[in-house]
């Protein structure tokens, strides 16, 4: 305490100067309108800058919560799209009963591992069986298809990327409905190929390619990409269609796992028919 008192005595002139400066500043600001406006304007800028920086810092630490909230919002929007419902309309001469039953639900997940430079590529998600994810279900983003669930554990899922030599996804030309199988030939992760499009089909550069809805993995109408080039394979009746993917496979963060609520019913029926025809 004594040292503190000696400090103030030693530098009393300096502290007196500071006090007088503050008093002078206060009197100038309060007794002069122009100076008061300058002070208020400067103070507001400084305060605004401080809170802006504060919000950025707080926002950085809250990114996880924000992303989770956005994922849930996107999930709800996806489930409200027409292709997420099954049309159960019954139309006869005497009776008409029309309503839609939910067919697809979406489980948001975050990618925790991803590869694009191999011949067979995979992704790992931070959601698993305990979150409702099942094997052989589709995975998408808001930009397009990503892959198919290969294996699940309690809390994680491994997805076979569309950048895999075994990938076969039913896709079609949006405006004509000609369909084929989407496959990857390796190399550039920005492109895949659509086969089995007959050469009498009209196809042009820039045409949109979407999922056909013929498999149980993806709803109809999910974006795949656009036609980069289409040439008839020599000696065949089909096109070789080069498709530029709409999803940037090297820049992924969050995805949605597609849960087809009618998948088992459809596949069971198709297996019964196949077995009966053997």
Image (cartoon, rainbow, N blue to C red):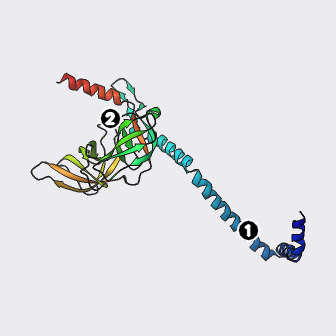
State how far apart marks 2 and 1 are (Cα). 62 Å
Q: Is 25 rendered above or below residue 206?
A: below
Q: Which residue is mark 1?
A: 43
Q: Is 41 rendered above or below residue 111?
A: below
Q: Nearer the viewer, residue 48 or 239?
A: 48
Q: Quadrant of the C terminus?
A: top left
Point 24% across, 44% down: residue: 181
Residue 34: x and y in percent read 78, 76
Q: Nearer the viewer, residue 178 or 114?
A: 114
Q: Which residue is mark 2?
A: 216
Whether residue 25 appears in this view of the structure is yes
Whether residue 222 appears in this view of the structure is no
Residue 160: x and y in percent read 33, 42
Indicate which disc, 2 or 1, sits on the residue closer to the N terminus. Answer: 1
Point 37% across, 24% down: residue: 95
**Horizontal side of residue 77 vs 200, given as left or right:** right
Q: Are marks 2 and 1 in contact (CB under 8 Å)?
A: no
Point 39% across, 35% down: residue: 152
Residue 276: x and y in percent read 20, 22
Q: Quadrant of the N terminus?
A: bottom right
**Horizontal side of residue 271 vs 219, given as left or right:** left
Q: Is 180 rendered above or below residue 18?
A: above
Report helix, strand or loop for mark 1.
helix
**Horizontal side of residue 273 vs 110, given as left or right:** left
Q: Nearer the viewer, residue 171 or 259?
A: 259
Residue 6: x and y in percent read 89, 70
Q: Nearer the viewer, residue 271 or 172?
A: 271
């Amino acid at each position: 305490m004594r040292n503190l008192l000696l400090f103030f005595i030693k530098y009393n002139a300096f502290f007196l100067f500071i006090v007088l400066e503050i008093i002078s500043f206060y009197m100038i600001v309060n007794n002069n309108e122009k100076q008061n406006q300058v002070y208020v304007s400067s103070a507001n800028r400084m305060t605004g800058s401080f809170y802006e920086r504060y919000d950025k810092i707080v926002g950085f630490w809250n990114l996880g919560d924000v992303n989770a909230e956005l994922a849930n919002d996107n999930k709800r929007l996806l489930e409200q799209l027409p292709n997420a419902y099954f049309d159960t309309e019954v139309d006869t001469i005497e009776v008409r009963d029309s309503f839609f039953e939910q067919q697809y639900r979406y489980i948001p997940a975050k990618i925790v591992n991803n590869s694009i430079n191999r011949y067979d590529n995979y992704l790992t998600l931070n959601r698993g069986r305990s979150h409702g994810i099942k094997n052989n279900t589709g995975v998408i983003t808001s930009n397009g298809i990503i892959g198919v669930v290969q294996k699940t554990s309690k809390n994680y899922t491994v997805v076979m990327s569309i950048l895999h030599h075994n990938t076969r996804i039913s896709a079609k030309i949006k405006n004509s409905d000609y369909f084929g199988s989407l496959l990857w030939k390796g190399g550039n992760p920005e492109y895949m190929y659509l086969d089995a499009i007959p050469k009498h089909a009209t196809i042009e550069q820039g045409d949109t390619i979407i999922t056909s809805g013929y498999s149980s993995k993806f709803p109809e109408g999910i974006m795949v990409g656009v036609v980069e080039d289409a040439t008839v394979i020599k000696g065949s009746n089909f096109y070789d269609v080069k498709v530029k993917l709409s999803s940037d496979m090297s820049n992924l963060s969050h995805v949605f796992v597609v849960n087809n609520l009618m998948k088992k019913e459809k596949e069971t029926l198709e297996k019964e028919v196949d077995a009966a025809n053997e």
